[in-house]
Amino acid sequence: MKIEFSSLEEGSASFALDDASIAFANALRRAMISEVMAFAIEDVKIYDNASALFDEILTHRLGLIPLVTDPDSFVPRSKCSCNGAGCTRCTVTLTMSVEGPCMVTSGDLISQDSVVRPALDNIPIVKLEKNQKVVIEAQAYMERGMEHAKWSPTTICGYKNYPIITHDDRCDGCGLCVEVCPKEILLVKGSAIGLKDGALESCSLCRLCEQACLNSGIGDEPAIHIKMDDRRFLFTVESAGALPTVRIIKQGLLFLKNQSDELYEALSEIRG
Amino acid sequence: MIPVRCFTCGKVISTAYEEYKRRRDENEDPKKILDDLGMDRYCCRCMLLTHKEIIDELNPYQ
């Protein structure tokens, strides 16, 4: 198994996963979406809310703010020694006290921890007029994306099979397939079609080119062939802001490793 | 208030709204503004394009 990055930034990454089964690719995708833990606000004490928004809407908006997460310094609340009561090992308290007229933003949240704080400071929460006031105390903790999407560290996270584009010698370079390709990855090279440099990965496997080739009256089989590589996958991962993408991928792989280790141990016990 | 995240994909889009609104009111082409703001997907673009701000109409009523 091999991972080859074609782009790797803090906010988004795309890579090719080579020599893996489709089951493994999907397991990795699901692990990154719903098993990697991230911080999010869950409990909010509202001391004062004179804004036009209801308490519930205000709290919902607070919950959706991505918080920078350091999974090494905190433990999930369900596994914490405080038994879910909330202590400094699993919970971070954020406070906010703002008086209008102004726009309340995520930057107004003051965190008790130096690392866990809003990933973006300019997320608008509510607009306050004169004499309006919001005073809250919020508790954030780590949870899985499976519990609620606000804890998922990813936004876009998916894969497609690696495309294989070939043509046989019946291709006469008529260019019909070049015209219909929505991703514009094909071009006419002499008397046959070819690929633009580095454009192969943008193929969405829509097969409009095969259809266009058939419509040209070439026969029952098109001269251009779009196939999928069953052992190679193109992943796209985008971070919501809680964790850098490389960390999401690592944590997802770590989760899969731990799960298979657990399964191995359980099976070993049964066998004795 | 503009939703914090895109309903469909979950990208934080509310941070782009202030600039979007300002440039739209200066009669700039929404397509260009959205491209500049990094709104690549049509789900996120739709969130900004179709938002109607009513907080100023609600604010007089407690």
Image: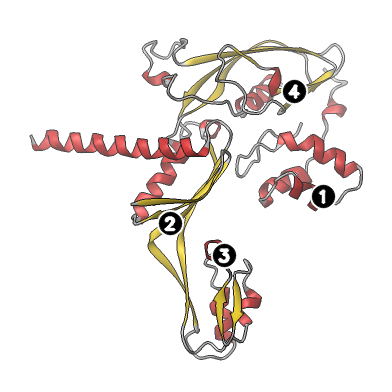
Which residue lies at the image location 82% right of the left edge and 50% below the top edge? B30
Separation of residues labelled 2 and 3 (CA atoms):
16 Å
Chain letter of disc 4 in the image: A
Disc 4 + disc 1, Cβ < 8 Å: no
Separation of residues labelled 4 and 3 (CA atoms):
48 Å
- Mark 4 / mark 2, whichever is N-terminal: 4
Which residue is situated farthest in the left direction here? A272
According to the image, label 3 marks what residue? A199
According to the image, label 1 marks what residue? B30
Q: Can residue B52 be seen in this view?
A: no
Chain letter of disc 3 in the image: A
Lateral position of residue A200 relative to residue A251, left or right = right
Local secondary structure at mark 1 = helix
- Mark 2 / mark 3, whichever is N-terminal: 3
Residues flagged by tags 4 and 3 on a common chain: yes
Which amino acid does the dot numbered 4 rest on?
Leu
Chain letter of disc 2 in the image: A
Residues flagged by tags 4 and 1 on a common chain: no
* x, y percent for residue A35: 42, 35
Residues flagged by tags 1 and 2 on a common chain: no
Separation of residues labelled 1 and 3 (CA atoms):
28 Å
Separation of residues labelled 1 and 2 (CA atoms):
35 Å
According to the image, label 2 marks what residue? A233
* x, y percent for residue A202: 56, 62
Q: Which quadrant of the figure contains the C terminus of chain A?
A: top left
Q: Is residue B14 visible?
A: yes
Residues flagged by tags 2 and 3 on a common chain: yes
* x, y percent for residue A98: 75, 13
Decide: few, some or many residues near mark 4? Use Cα within 10 Å; few <14, some 14-19, many ≥20. Answer: some
Task: From the image, state whether disc 4 or disc 1 is nearer to you.
Answer: 1
Task: From the image, state whether disc 4 or disc 2 is nearer to you.
Answer: 2
Which residue lies at the image location 53% right of the left edge and 78% below the top edge? A210
